[in-house]
Image: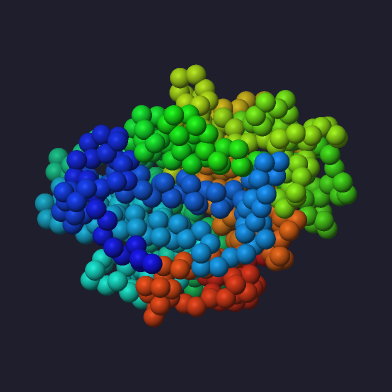
Amino acid sequence: MKNIKFLLPLIAVTLFSCDDYLDVNTSPDLLLIDQVGPSKLLPAAQVGTFRVQATTMNQLGNVFSNAWASNVQSYTGGYAREFQLTIDNAFYTGIWDGLYLNVNNLQKIIDFPNPDHKNDYYVAVAKILKAHYMQHIVDLYGDAPYDEAFRGLVNKTPKYNDDQYIYRKLLGELDDARKIIKDSDPDVAEDISGTDVMLHGDMDQWDRFANTIELRMLLRMSNNTGAVATYRDTRLTALSTKNFLTTDVSINPGYSDSNDAALNPFYAVFGFDSALNATQNRTFISPSGHVYKSMLPSSNYSTTGTPEIIAGSGISYPNVTDPRFSRIFAAGSGQPYRRAVTQGSIVVDVFPTTGVIGLPGRIGNGNFNPYNVLPGSFPYGSAANGYVMSLAEAKFILAEAALRYPAYGSAQTYFNAGVTASFAYFGSTVGTYLTTINTTKPNFGFNIANTFNQNLHAIMYQKWASQIGVNAIESFIDYNRTGYPLTPLALNATKTRKPRRLIYPISEYVANSANVPNLTEAQIFADTDPSFPFWQLGSPALGN
């Protein structure tokens, strides 16, 4: 198998239209990537990295955080490996291979000759996005190639760097990017508003995005002690006076239904093709029983046994109607009710009224058409924006920072803003929901009278709800760090906890066998093995 992340992809030099940005086919007549400048590389890299985040990473996060299940009425064996936790070097290889392939384009921008500083803004953006995506490589795998990566044919077998070292290098990339933005002469640096398909050349928001990424990285280290904690706290102090995101970081190179390549990638994988034919995922994915019981009152589903999320945890489902549920999930085709499937169940087993059977629900309009900003409603999600980081996610990052470090302000204010932004994203009306959870539901709402752990669980729970179908891999990573929100395993799970990391893909074991660490399946589930990401050291063993 090719070690694709170190091969130089071909890329069109005429990336002036949406179709060109999105077209994955190449021609032998087109120039090699080494001959393409930053103005062509940037939109291609932005679109390519986001596609991995919105599809492969998003799906794994939704399943591992127990928001998605499979339609057992129509399919058998759905998500068997994910539910059973059967993980090997063929498990979700698209994350590693896809990110390295596309981050390579970002590195090409960074390395492109820039003696007159004309490309300064391109370099700054590339460094910020490199930090964003390489952080996820570390968070999901631990040690990885970094110093010797992205050299193409010069080094096809790069050595692995320590994950903590990579984190520090990525924070250095953010430092570099912010300095470039601050010091660049706008009369010299090229205006990137026409080629930046994310923030359209708004360098203030790019600076804020860099700060928000750094804060997320530093919070990953919350459980570390010693020298790592000292380093973390020094940076946290310096960062506390900076500005953070005030808007979504969205992406749209011109998504449309003109052809399959031009579709919003989430819509294309989980919705429809350009001819409005439903993808298999459209009928395959259903809401899990866990998400159903988390977001609807107990009187609205068939219950057996304890109302606790995990038996013995002392934390029960909130028993409050969350209006976002009806936007995140829709009823099954031709069905009057939204039904759900407990992960690992062979029947549709969670529904409004005992005895009401039928197809389970499926992905709803709020995922395909957030904010309802497009003409009409579903299925116009083909042209909808993608979201690299939602405003809700940014606010919950700040809420956790303020909970742990008061210098960051009011955790309550950020928490409320995160919930409000999430409702706006899904096109829901918050009504009395926020007041109800904050005043009567510890672990799901924030209140200064709650314990630290109750408020931390509330932040992680609401962050999880806000990222369903959006950027759900964050919920799985946060779970490995905090143990929150409490998340049950599938009924047919063969392990007692979710994995602490993924196994390196087969591409590494084939093409970089001298350097890739050898891992066993047992290692990735162990509580004391040193192979998992460094920031998990000292993390609490909460939930499953």
Q: Which residue is found at the position 73% from the left and 29% from the top?
A: 337
Classify residue 293 as left or right of residue 394: right
Q: Residue furthest left?
A: 116
- Quadrant position of the N terminus in the picture: bottom left
- Choose top left, top right, bottom left or bottom right for residue 314: bottom right
User: Residue 45 at x, y = what percent?
Assistant: 31, 49
Question: What residue do we see at 49% from left, 73% from top?
Answer: 227
Mark count? 0
| Residue 528, position as x, y percentages in the image | 63, 76
Q: Quadrant of residue 492?
A: bottom right
321 with respect to 36 (left or right) = right
Q: Residue at x 19, y 51 (%)?
A: 28
> Which residue appears at 50% of the width and 52% of the height?
57
Residue closest to the eye, 340 or 460: 340
| Residue 454, horizontal then vertical, whole percent | 72, 51
Nearer the observer, 60 or 439: 60
Instruction: Give residue 392's position: percent from left, percent from top.
Output: 53, 40
Residue 248 appears in the picture as rendered: no
Q: Quick one: which residue is furthest to the right in this view? A: 305
Query: Is residue 210 depicted above or below 361 in this figure?
Result: below
- Quadrant including the C terminus: bottom right
Residue at the extreme bottom of the image, as rendered: 514
| 473 versus 378 height, above or below | below
Q: Is residue 140 above or below residue 212?
A: below
Q: Nearer the viewer, residue 534 or 348?
A: 348
Q: Quadrant of residue 433?
A: top right
Question: Is 529 left, or right, of 373 in this rendering?
Answer: right
Residue 372 visible in rendering? yes
Tell me if 97 is positioned left or right of 347 in this view: left
